[in-house]
Image (tube, helix red, strand yellow):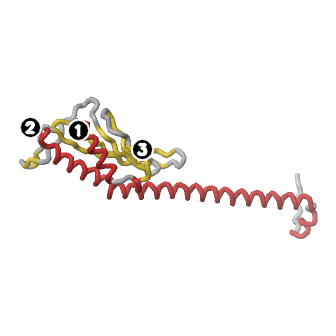
Amino acid sequence: MAIWVAMDRKKMEALVSDEFKRRLDAAAERAHARRVAASAEQGNNSTAEQRWANTLQAATRVWENRIRPAIGHAITQANQAIVHDEKMLSIQDGAAAHYAAATGINTELPYADVFAGPLAKSRAPQVAGVLTTPQPKRSLGTAQRLRFAMRDNGAVEMTAHDCDVARIPAMPIDQFTDEQIEAAIADFVDVLIPK
């Protein structure tokens, strides 16, 4: 059976050797330094994640306010020009799910597919008996299309599928111009209606 003797703090400190006290103080300093470093690292990671999220939010706003409307406007202009050829362009919006493993954040990256097809006049959709904008007939197989898409770094690119239209490589969204969009749509029309 152990006998505990109550000692006051001064007597206890007198019994502790200077070497032991020095080593405990050093350990306490290391533990404090580790907590500070871990806190700083977590703050840096949070800051990097926040910067990434802010970049994507800003790019998405630019997509919604400038890029997507510019694509729609270019398609409308192209359809007005090619209406006599019984062809039509249409657009399908979507969002690709993206998981960033480094940050653990899920996000949706918008894209717009531009399709071409023969105009299906007899199958033009009607809403409450009113003829709406006709849509091109699409095959279920591979279709010629352009895909304008936002990437996980906020950049935008355009890729062509089953057609000979030059790819627009990924670039910062503020450098992706309406003129590039119009040129890609015009190139697509040239593929559909050869010179």
The mark that comes first in sequence, 3 or 2, is: 2
Instruction: Give how far apart the Cα atoms at labels 3 and 2 are.
Output: 39 Å
* Secondary structure found at label 3: strand
Q: Position of residue 101 (x, y in %)?
A: 52, 44
The residue tagged 3 is: 169
Above or below residue 28? Residue 110 is above
Report the quarter where the C terminus lies. top left
Amino acid beneath label 2: Ser
| 35 vs 6, nearest the viewer | 35
Q: Nearer the viewer, residue 102 or 73?
A: 73
Q: At 17% across and 39% down in the image, what residue appears?
A: 87
Residue 66 in the figure: left or right of residue 46 = left
Q: Position of residue 43 (x, y in %)?
A: 60, 59
Report which quarter residue 33 is drawn in. Answer: bottom right
Disc count in the image?
A: 3
The residue lying at 53 percent from left, 49 percent from top is 103
Q: CA distance from mark 1 to mark 3?
A: 22 Å
- The reply to whether callout 3 and callout 2 are in contact (CB within 8 Å) is no
Please give the label number shown on residue 122. Answer: 2
Q: Is residue 143 above or below residue 183?
A: above
Which residue was labeled with disc 1? 116
Residue at the spot x=58%, y=55% of the render?
45
Closest to the camera, between mark 2 and mark 1, is 1
